[in-house]
Amino acid sequence: MSIVACAEIRSGYPFRGPVEPVASSGVLVAQMKDIDPLGGLRWETMVRTELPGKRAPDWLQIGDILFVPRGSRFFAASIDAPPEPAVCGPHLVHLRLRAGVGVLPAFLAWQINQPPLQRQLRAAAEGSSQLSIRIAEIEALQIAVPSIAQQLRIVAFAAAVLRERQLLTQLIQNREQELASLAITLAHAAGLDMN
């Protein structure tokens, strides 16, 4: 199935120029800096702003997917519940699954991030100083659509892998801190100047 057959694909809200912070606003803006390839969307880093212009916003909803179409790595992240009204900025692509397509948002985001689709995206990328993907190229991507039960198993497996990676990273950081502390203790015991 093509992605356009299972999802509406649109660009983000058309800000003219940079997104200006407005601390008193109740509107969040997701930008490329707010999406991590592994951790997904970080609501706490988003800028609050007022929406300029008259265009009605496409508010982000549970199950939407944001796609980063520029840079050295193209990736997608599915959205959990927005804590407040939020839109995505113009440099992101906003995907919303069509009703009844039988595709889970987390599964679609996972599949976009995997090597087969990543190869297609890299082959379609354009630009000399910064690579980018056009919406037409995203729409043309072909995805596999297994049963919902299998999609749920894959999503759960991917979440377990992510959790293992986070735990291993934390373990490595803890060991490095222990080694640094040991080195300082040895230096003090030997009377070495640590300044």
Image (cartoon, rainbow, N blue to C red):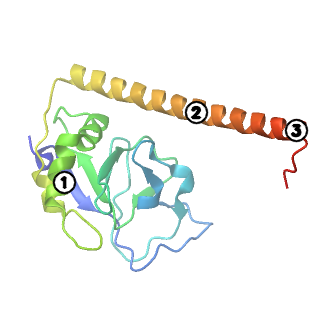
Q: Residue 76: image x %, image y %?
A: 31, 48
Q: Residue furthest bottom?
A: 17
Name the residue rendered at 17%, 48% in the picture: 119
What's the CA distance linking mark 2 and mark 1? 33 Å
Q: How far across and down, in percent of the image, does residue 138 sit?
A: 17, 55
Disc 3 marks a residue whose amino acid type is Ala
Q: Which mark is residue 172?
A: 2
Q: Position of residue 164 (x, y in %)?
A: 47, 27
Q: Going by the image, does 162 lie left or right of 180?
A: left
As rendered, which of 75 and 15 lies closer to the eye? 75
Provide the secondary structure element on which disc 3 rests: loop
How many residues crowd mark 2 within 10 Å: few (<14), some (14–19), many (20+)?
Answer: few
First in sequence: mark 2 vs mark 1: 1
The quarter of the displayed image where residue 73 is located: bottom left
The answer to whether any part of residue 30 appears in the image is no
Q: Quadrant of the N terminus?
A: top left
* In front: label 2 or label 3: 3
User: How many other residues sit within 10 Å of disc 1, few (<14), some (14-19) or many (≥20)?
Assistant: many
Instruction: Find out whether the residues at labels 2 and 1 contact each other: C-beta distance under 8 Å.
Output: no
Q: Position of residue 71 (x, y in %)?
A: 33, 62
Q: Which residue is mark 1?
A: 121
User: In the picture shown, does residue 3 fall above or below 134?
Assistant: above
Q: Tell me the residue that label 3 is attached to.
A: 190
- Residue at position x 35%, y 67% in the image: 13
60 up-or-down from 126: above or below? above
Which-is-in-front pick, marks 2 and 1? 2
Picture disc at residue 195:
none
Camera-nearest label, 3 or 1: 3
Mark 1 belongs to which amino acid? Leu
- Between disc 2 and disc 3, whose residue precedes? 2
Amino acid type at circle 2 is Ile
The Cα atoms of the two marked residues, 3 and 1, are separated by 57 Å
